[in-house]
C-alpha cells in the first residue's frame, strides 16, 4: 500500500513539474522570440531544462533497474521456497506411504501371531 502511494506521489510530482515547465515555456516564448539576446537566453535555459530532464530520466531508469533487480531476487527466493515446499510435501507423502505399509505389515504380523498361537494351542491339546 505504501509503495503504491509513494509511486503515485512520484508520478504526480513529475507530471506537475512537467506542467510547470510547459507553462513557463508558453509564457516566456512570445516575449523572448522578439529580441535576439532574450532568444539566446531562452534557448540556453531550454538546454538546461533538457539536461535536467535527461538527468531525471537517467535517475528514473536507475530506480527502475533497481526495482527490477529486487523483483528478480524476490522471484528467485519465492521459487526456492516453492521448491522446498514441494520437496517437503513429497517427503511427507513418502513418509505417509511408509507408515501405511508399516501398519499393513503390523496387521499381518498380528494375524500370523494369532494363527501361531492357535496352532500351538491345538498341538498342546493333542
Image: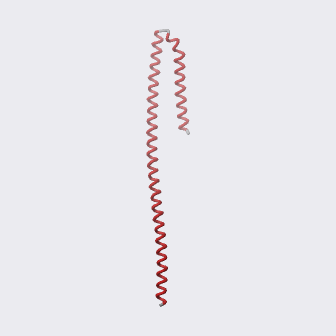
> In x, y percent, where is residue 6?
54, 35
> In x, y percent, where is residue 108?
47, 74
> In x, y percent, where is residue 115?
48, 80
Q: Residue furthest bottom?
A: 126
Q: Nearer the viewer, residue 111 or 63?
A: 111
Residue, x 44% and y 51% (percent of image)? 83
Residue, x 46% and y 81% (percent of image)? 116
- Above or below residue 54? Residue 67 is below
Number of numbered discs: 0
Q: Quadrant of the N terminus?
A: top right
- Above or below residue 55? Residue 69 is below
Residue, x 44% and y 36% (percent of image)? 66
Residue, x 44% and y 55% (percent of image)? 87
- Above or below residue 95? Residue 13 is above
Question: How does the figure colour the protein chain or chains?
Answer: secondary structure
Amino acid at each position: 500500500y505504501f509503495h503504491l502511494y509513494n509511486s503515485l506521489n512520484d508520478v504526480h510530482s513529475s507530471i506537475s513539474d512537467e506542467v510547470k515547465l510547459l507553462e513557463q515555456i508558453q509564457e516566456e516564448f512570445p516575449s523572448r522570440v522578439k529580441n535576439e539576446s532574450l532568444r539566446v537566453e531562452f534557448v540556453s535555459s531550454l538546454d538546461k531544462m533538457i539536461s535536467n530532464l535527461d538527468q531525471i530520466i537517467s535517475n528514473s531508469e536507475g530506480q527502475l533497474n533497481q526495482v527490477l533487480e529486487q523483483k528478480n531476487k524476490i522471484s528467485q527466493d519465492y521459487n526456492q521456497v516453492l521448491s522446498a515446499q514441494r520437496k517437503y510435501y513429497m517427503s511427507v507423502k513418502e513418509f505417509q506411504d511408509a507408515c501405511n505399509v508399516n501398519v499393513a505389515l503390523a496387521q499381518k504380523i498380528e494375524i500370523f501371531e494369532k494363527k501361531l498361537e492357535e496352532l500351538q494351542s491345538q498341538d498342546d491339546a493333542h
